[in-house]
Image: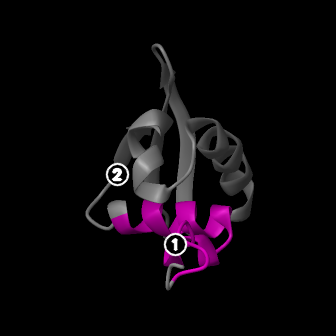
Amino acid sequence: MSASTQPDASTSDSKPKDERLADYLRSRVEDGELYFKSKFIAEDVSLSSKEIGALIIKLQDSVDDLSIERWSYTGATTWRVEQTG
């Protein structure tokens, strides 16, 4: 019997998904702006690219300290994020 009863549980899962994504974006834009495609950050935030796509729309309206905009679409949406104020 293993010492851990939930081997897949991690500390990153303790926060809601939208907070994890917002925290990640904040940490990446400290030095300026960030351009990203969901599939390239999915592993970093332990979310699927589909989850990120849904959450980023929600964050556009709910996070006041970040400016999030759809930048372009070439194979997948590229998002632009920068700090506000």
Residue behind mark 2: 33
| In this rendering, position of residue 77 left or right of residue 60 | left
Going 60% across and 45% down the picture, which residue do you hit?
Answer: 52
Residue behind mark 1: 12
Q: In this view, does 32 lie above or below 42?
A: below
Q: Nearer the viewer, mark 1 or mark 2?
A: 1
User: What residue type is disc 1 on?
Assistant: Ser
Q: Which sits earlier in the primary sequence, circle 1 or circle 2?
A: 1
Q: Can residue 76 be seen in this view?
A: yes
| In this rendering, position of residue 18 left or right of residue 32 | right
User: What residue type is disc 2 on?
Assistant: Glu
Instruction: Check disc 2 and report its element: helix, strand or loop.
Output: loop
Majority secondary structure of the magenta segment?
A: helix
Going 52% across and 73% down the picture, which residue do you hit?
Answer: 10
> Percent x, y for residue 13?
59, 71
Choose between 28 and 51: the one closer to the eye. 51
Going 45% across and 14% down the picture, which residue do you hit?
Answer: 74
Q: Residue furthest front?
A: 1
Instruction: Check disc 1 and report its element: helix, strand or loop.
Output: helix
Going 34% across and 51% down the picture, which residue do you hit?
Answer: 33
Choose between 83 and 51: the one closer to the eye. 51
What residue span does the magenta drawing correspond to? Answer: 4-27
Q: How far apart are marks 1 and 2 (CA)?
A: 24 Å
- Counting other residues with Cα less than 10 Å from the Cα at mark 1, is it few (<14), some (14-19), or many (20 or more)? few
Q: Is residue 62 above or below residue 78?
A: below
